Image (cartoon, rainbow, N blue to C red):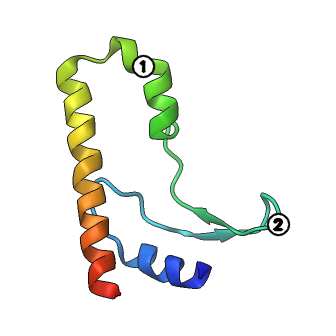
Amino acid sequence: MLLREYRARKQLQHENLLPLLGFSYEFGPLPAMISPWMKNGSLTTYLGKNFAELTIKRKLQILQQVATAINYRMWLLHLLA
């Protein structure tokens, strides 16, 4: 199942999705998928630290980027099924 997810993720190429670089076995009993390091951390971390300071326009831009990435991922995974 993990290999199938890896193959699907490896094919994702979208401006709002981080590429998959590979696996690491250094974080526990299960392998972790590795993507490039983001200087602001994950989206959850970034929003947790900056949400109050973000304008409504920026919040909506982030929402649009997330929705676009999810839509692309769902479309591609549907094609691969």
Residue at 49% across / 67% down in the picture?
A: 20
Picture layout, residue 33 above or below residue 16: below
Picture layout, residue 40 above or below residue 4: above
User: In terms of secondary structure, where does tag 2 sit?
Assistant: loop
Q: Position of residue 31 (x, y in %)?
A: 71, 69
Kindly report the distance in space between the C-alpha atoms of the residues bearing marks 2 and 1: 33 Å
User: In terms of secondary structure, where does tag 1 sit?
Assistant: helix
Q: Position of residue 53 (x, y in %)?
A: 35, 12
Picture layout, residue 71 above or below residue 67: below
Q: Residues within 10 Å of mark 1 (few under 14, many from 20)?
A: few
Residue at 38% across / 12% down in the picture?
A: 52
Q: Looking at the figure, which quarter contains the N terminus?
A: bottom right
Left/right placement of residue 53 relative to residue 49 reads: left
Instruction: Determine which residue is flagged by label 2.
Output: 29
Give whichever of 64, 42 is nearer the camera.
Answer: 64
Q: Looking at the figure, which quarter contains the C terminus?
A: bottom left
Task: Give the number of the mark in front: 2 or 1.
Answer: 2
- The residue at the far bottom in this view is 81
Looking at the rendered structure, the kind of residue marked 1 is Asn
Mark identifier at residue 66? none
Looking at the rendered structure, the kind of residue marked 2 is Pro
Q: Position of residue 59 (x, y in %)?
A: 26, 27
Instruction: Determine which residue is flagged by label 1.
Output: 50
Left/right placement of residue 27 relative to residue 57 reads: right
Picture layout, residue 49 above or below residue 65: above
